[in-house]
């Protein structure tokens, strides 16, 4: 029986003739991605302090786990994209010779050994999740004795983990893969894929296509882009050709305004459509505001979410009918909001295989890891509820409940609650933390946006609750995204190939290789959460493999959490009915059950608001009576 690496002392490592890396890292951060890089000469020794971008940084200590992975979130102040640090890791070589050094990072790194460049992933990013020391390996010649590995780390996609050590090319790993193949698990895709992307103008396109190209074995395939805006469609086609070229993959890129021309033979459909573009964003926000309903986002619930659903669901159901006819075995991966209403309407009226995908669970879980100081891969958690209001009913580390630690920070650390005012206040009163942002969640609740004094107390800028945030900024973001695409196509900005934490690529990989993966998906509540409506849609853990997407039974949510979800699900229920039956009356009834709207308006005011919204958006709501 071989000795496990984590059980080895220095003498055992020396006898094996392998490098020994310290588990105690010295970290200087946070460092902005845009900050000027230090000169290689500054990486030959671990300094007492470090000046980067005009800031004098003091050393912090991060301890790696037995697998050589360390979460840098506490040292860089969170998990936001672009935050970085310089990490110094001592190691020893048992003798002179050539060795392999393994590195992995969320998401980019540049590394030096004794001041000499080892390697980097600045143009490619990482290729696997979770991060391991086997993601990238670099050969280096070393003298016997002590050495220093210095790493410039840059976070991406909300990750903050760096892994360092010996890449695992052991016979045991090879045997493990052989046994996996005997059980039907493959290590790569074995067929050319056909993916249809609906809504090619979506900001999701670049990340999701890049993710698909990073799937092992996905070297050939077809990406069919669909959009009704021919200018943005052409730009998307050029961008995807650039991405495929940069990745060195032989993918065919096609583009059309007619989805029926490309659906036949599709394996996966990614839905990112936006019906009416930005034409109704102001109506969705400003008309409700006249009645006192103050929204931050307004695209998943409340008046804005309802009218986005009224415009979008009929188109989505028409798409699903085409999928039923032309590619009934394909999986539909839906990213379009309002998530719960679209998925509910699909579940009630279509046989197509649909799952709703969001990144709020990934984001919230990484945030909790950072706040509790626990390496992400060691965090144990369970999350369930409805989209944007799913509850972390378990949050623990090595059997110890982390909620008391988190709640102490809220109570004892001045200003800590400013990080996420609404969600942290909700946690303190309801006992559990929930997904998404304070801006989104404040719209699902009757508590925080019904009076100006409450908005001033609990709501902050941007996604933390800013009034009219989306209505003000969404049109500008769309223009900026198009401009960025033009720059990428022109070559004035580099193409990034780092893999994001969005679920679509991991779903495709799991289905194609039969290597199981767990996502949090929006699916019909068929016996999944016992104390929520069984004819609704919920967000729960789902197992993905060659058999498809299998939701798991969660049981009962805490009663207080279930009640808030249930309240919103009653709104979703009538909203889906209004969309499917094109009923103005059902739309008004839905808004009468919306928690925020009902906290502000009486039924007569809600009916008047509904009628005014229908009148303003008449051109985008054909057939409603």
Image: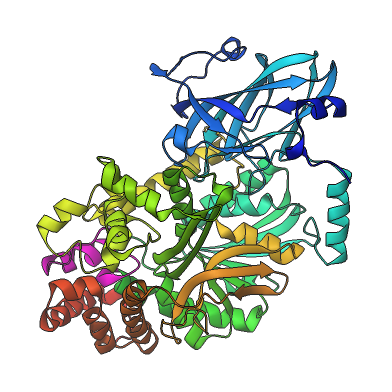
In the image, 550 versus 554, the foreground residue is 554
In this rendering, is residue 599 above or below 86?
below
Percent coordinates x, y for residue 48 in the rendering: 49, 13
Specify start and end residues of the magenta stretch as a single range: 281-304
In this rendering, is residue 102 above or below 455?
above
What residue is drawn where x is 33% and y is 85%? 574
Percent coordinates x, y for residue 463 in the rendering: 31, 51
Q: Residue furthest top?
A: 41
The answer to which image quadrant residue 147 occupies is top right
Magenta span contains residue 303: yes
Which colour scheme appears in the figure?
A: rainbow
Q: In the visual, does 231 lie left or right of 207?
A: left
Percent coordinates x, y for residue 373 in the rendering: 47, 42
Quadrant the C terminus occupies? bottom left
In the image, 166 versus 330, the foreground residue is 166
What residue is drawn where x is 22% and y is 66%? 283
In the image, 263 versus 387, the foreground residue is 387
Judge whether residue 280 can be spotted in this image. no
In this rendering, is residue 199 above or below 624?
above
In the image, 347 versus 83, the foreground residue is 83
């Amino acid at each position: 029986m071989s000795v496990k690496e984590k059980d080895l002392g220095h003498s055992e490592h020396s006898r094996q003739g392998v490098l020994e890396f310290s588990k105690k890292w010295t970290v200087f951060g946070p460092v902005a991605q845009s900050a000027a890089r230090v000169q290689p000469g500054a990486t030959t020794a671990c300094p007492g302090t470090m000046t980067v971008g005009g800031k004098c940084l003091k050393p912090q200590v991060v301890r790696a786990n037995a697998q050589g992975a360390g979460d840098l979130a506490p040292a860089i102040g969170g998990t936001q994209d672009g935050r970085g640090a310089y990490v110094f890791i001592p190691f020893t070589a048992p003798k002179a010779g050539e060795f392999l050094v393994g590195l992995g990072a969320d998401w980019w790194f540049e590394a030096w050994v004794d001041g000499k460049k080892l390697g980097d992933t600045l143009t490619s990013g990482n290729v696997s999740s979770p991060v391991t020391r086997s993601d990238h390996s670099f050969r280096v010649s070393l003298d016997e004795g002590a050495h220093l590995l210095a790493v410039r780390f840059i976070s991406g996609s909300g990750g903050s983990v760096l892994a360092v050590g010996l890449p695992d090319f052991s016979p045991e790993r090879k045997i493990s893969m052989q046994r996996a193949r005997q059980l039907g698990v493959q290590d790569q895709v074995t067929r050319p894929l056909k993916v249809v992307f609906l809504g090619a103008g979506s900001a999701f396109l670049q990340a999701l296509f890049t993710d698909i190209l990073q799937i092992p074995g996905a070297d050939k395939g077809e990406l069919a882009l669909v959009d009704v805006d021919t200018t943005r469609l052409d730009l998307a086609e050029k961008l995807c050709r650039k991405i495929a070229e940069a990745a060195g993959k032989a993918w065919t890129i096609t583009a059309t305004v007619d989805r029926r021309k490309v659906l036949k033979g599709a394996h996966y459909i990614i839905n990112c459509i936006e019906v009416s573009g930005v034409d109704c964003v102001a109506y969705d926000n400003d008309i409700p505001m006249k009645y006192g309903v103050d929204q931050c986002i307004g695209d998943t619930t409340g008046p804005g979410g309802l009218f986005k659903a009224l415009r979008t669901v009929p188109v989505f159901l028409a798409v699903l009918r085409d999928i039923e006819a032309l590619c009934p075995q394909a999986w539909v991966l839906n990213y379009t909001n309002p998530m719960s209403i679209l998925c509910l309407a699909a579940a009630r009226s279509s046989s197509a295989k649909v799952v709703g995908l969001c990144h709020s669970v990934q984001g919230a879980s990484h945030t909790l890891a950072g706040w509790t100081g626990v390496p992400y891969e060691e965090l144990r958690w369970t999350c369930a509820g409805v989209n944007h209001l799913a509850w972390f009913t378990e949050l623990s580390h090595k059997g110890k409940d982390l909620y008391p630690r988190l709640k102490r920070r809220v109570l004892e650390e001045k200003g800590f609650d400013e990080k996420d005012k609404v969600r942290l206040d909700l946690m303190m009163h309801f006992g559990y933390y929930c997904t998404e942002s304070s801006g989104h969640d404040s719209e699902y609740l009757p508590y925080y946006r019904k009076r100006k004094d409450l908005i001033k107390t609990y709501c902050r800028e941007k996604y933390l609750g800013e009034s009219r945030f989306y209505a003000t900024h969404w049109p500008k973001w769309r223009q900026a995204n198009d401009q960025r695409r033009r720059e990428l196509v022109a070559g004035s900005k580099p193409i990034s190939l780092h893999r994001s934490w969005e679920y679509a690529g991991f779903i495709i990989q799991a289905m194609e290789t039969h290597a199981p993966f767990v996502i949090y998906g929006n699916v019909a509540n068929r016996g999944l959460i016992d104390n929520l409506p069984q004819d609704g849609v919920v967000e729960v853990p789902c197992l993905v493999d060659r058999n498809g997407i299998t939701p798991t039974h969660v049981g009962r949510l805490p009663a207080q959490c279930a009640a808030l979800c249930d309240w919103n699900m009653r709104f979703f229920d009538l909203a889906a009915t209004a969309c499917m039956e094109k009923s103005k009356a059902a739309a008004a009834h839905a808004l009468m059950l919306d928690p925020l709207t009902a906290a502000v308006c009486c039924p007569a005011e809600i009916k008047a608001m509904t009628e005014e919204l229908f009148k303003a958006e008449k051109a985008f709501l054909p057939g409603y009576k």
